[in-house]
Amino acid sequence: MIQPLDEGTQRFLKALASETRQQIMLTFAGGESLTVGEVATRCALGQSTASEQLSLLRQSGLLTAVKQGKNVHYSADAESIRSSLGELQDYLARCC
């Protein structure tokens, strides 16, 4: 019997199920580090919506957050993303 996806990979997939969060992730292409305000502006979102979505992406292992003064700078967590993709690839190889 095939084991279900681990909890982290499930959170990863749920986070990417939202078009808004997909759009936000694209803003980090190229390794950029962005604040909530910068993401809100680039994605045409309200500041509170951007903050909520960034928090969910961070909790799902897609982003890291570093506080610098009064601002929090977010960036893609490439290592965590690769790990979740590897888990997903292994799962799909076992089931299909």
Image (spheres, helix red, strand yellow):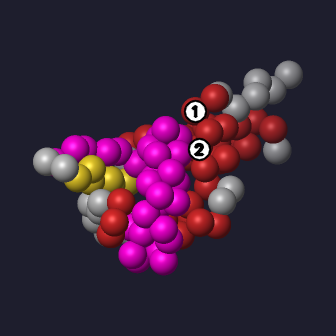
Q: Is residue 31 shown to the viewer in this render?
A: no
Residue 1 quadrant: top right
Q: Which mark is residue 26?
A: none
Q: Badge 1 is on which residue? A: 8
Q: Predominant secondary structure in magenta?
A: helix
Q: Residue at x 44, y 54 (%)?
A: 51
Q: Is residue 23 above or below residue 48?
A: below
> Which x, y percent locates residue 87?
59, 37
Crowd band around label 1 with a 10 angstrom C-alpha radius: few (<14), some (14–19), many (20+): some
Q: Badge 2 is on which residue? A: 12
Q: Are marks 1 and 2 in contact (CB under 8 Å)?
A: yes
The residue at the far right in this view is 1
Q: Is residue 86 above or below residue 4?
A: below
Q: Is residue 67 shown to the viewer in this render?
A: yes
Provide the residue span drawn in magenta. 39-68
Q: Residue at x 82, y 44 (%)?
A: 96
For residue 27, side relative to residue 15 (left or right): left
> Which x, y percent locates residue 95?
81, 38
Q: Residue at x 52, y 60 (%)?
A: 49
Q: Is residue 47 above or below residue 57?
A: below
**Three-letter code for the amino acid on which mark 1 is drawn:** Gly
